[in-house]
Image (cartoon, rainbow, N blue to C red):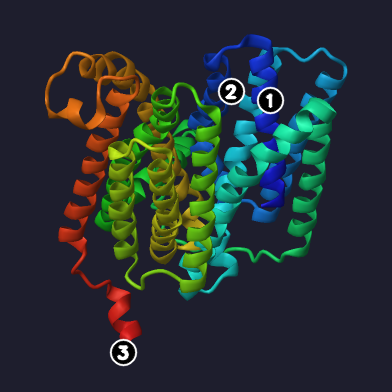
Amino acid sequence: MVSAIGSSMTYFALTLWMWQQTQSATAIALILVFYQLPQLAITLFSGMLIDRLPRKVLLWLSDAGAACCTLSVGILAGWQILQIWHIYLIAAIIGCFGNVQSLTYATLVPLIVPQQQHTRASSMGALVEHGAVILSPALAGVLYPLIGLLGITTIDMTTFAIAMLTLAIVKIPGTAQKTGESPPPPSKPTLWQQISHEVTFGFRYIAAHPNLLAMVVALSTFTFLHQIGEALYQPMILARTGGDTQTLGWVVAASGLGGVVGAIAFSLWGGFRRRPLGLLVGFIGTGLSKLLLGLGNVPSVWATARVGTSFHNPLIMSSYMAMWYDRVAPELQGRILAADYLVGTLVMLMANLVAGPLADQVFEPWMQHQTTVAISLWGRGPGSGMALLQVILALGILAVGAIGWGIYGRAVEPGDRDRQL
């Protein structure tokens, strides 16, 4: 978490620097685009590496590569030769290292934590994301005017050192390689056939296991609806408050606080014994929170809704990851989780691409010319269309949870009966 706070401070400082240079929200958004796009190309190869190389080595290399990129930003800023294209190029390179790092960390839990603690450990991991959301903008906002981008990256390098020291101390067991899990490719395969066989292994494995495929479909549907709302909730609040950044900051901080509270709560509790119930309860809780967000029209209601949304995020992701850990052998998790990660990345990109046009070209204009009951709830002012869209997305998420509950809610996991006995 210390390292994530440092990295988030650097990203926040880069957004401030980019805004000072361009006054363009699109230019800032492109940082994330350049960060994510290379991951589409290397994710499956990352999974192959994770299943074949010592995971501590991969973590050392990915941390060191990201640290060098951060250092280069500081040096270029210190020499006052940093340009926008430098930021985009460095973001793409960091995205590659970050992809290897994230996937490798995801496969560590079953190696160092007992099976009954998988949900608890995954919930603790949510503290990284949500803790950084709370602390990093405030720290970077105060320090950036005083020490500049070079100073922020220096702090980030210190946090990298803490992460590397922790990695050196922690013992990470290796995985026992098993035969027969991955059917061999055709006899005397060409190099291309070998690569194709390995790259597609994760997809073929998921397709051959209906329970895993159902998990991926359920979370992908939820993620698509959820991410559209995530992309639009900040513009919605700004539009409905006349650009009040203080109100937005308060709501964003409340969102981070909800995630931290949820992560701590589910870490202490350990989650549902029947993992799918944790996933579905998280879906329904998130849907209800988004419904409140869309129906609300005052900051206190928005903040409460965002607390609820973030509170359920650790439950969803920890239950989801625990199901993967329970169903997939550690020596196969790199390639299989990489396939799932690639699907998730594509779904999020699609959601981000359609969110803006849905708001700007469909719902916002439509609400300005309506006399229906929707006007009595949201009015015709700016942001009303996005608020209506939040409600529609919330109903979609609730439908996903209800359908999943009907299919899986009453089912008993094979391992649960044995554990109960």
Q: Which residue is mark 2?
A: 31
- Left or right placement of residue 64 versus residue 416 in this view: right
For marks 3 and 2 on the same chain, the one whose residue lies earlier in the sequence: 2
- Left or right placement of residue 105 versus residue 390 in this view: right
- Left or right placement of residue 400 versus residue 124 in this view: left
Residue at 64%, 26% in the rendered image: 91
For marks 2 and 1 on the same chain, the one whose residue lies earlier in the sequence: 1
Q: Are marks 2 and 1 in contact (CB under 8 Å)?
A: yes
Q: Which residue is mark 3?
A: 421
How dense is the environment of label 1, judged by Cα within 10 Å: few (below 14), some, or many (20 and up)? many
Outermost residue on the top side: it is 22
Residue 197's image quarter?
A: top left
Residue 107 visible at all: no
Residue 267 visible at all: yes
For marks 3 and 1 on the same chain, the one whose residue lies earlier in the sequence: 1
Residue 173's image quarter?
A: bottom right
Foreground pick, 346 / 199: 346
The amino acid type, in three-letter code, at marker 3 is: Leu
Question: Is disc 2 placed on a helix, strand or loop?
Answer: helix
The amino acid type, in three-letter code, at marker 1 is: Leu
Residue at 28%, 43% in the rendered image: 291
Q: CA distance from mark 3 to mark 2?
A: 52 Å
Foreground pick, 134 / 38: 134
Given this view, does label 3 or label 2 mark the residue nearer the observer?
2
Outermost residue on the left side: it is 372
Q: Which residue is mark 1?
A: 14
- Position of 421 relative to 127 (above/below): below
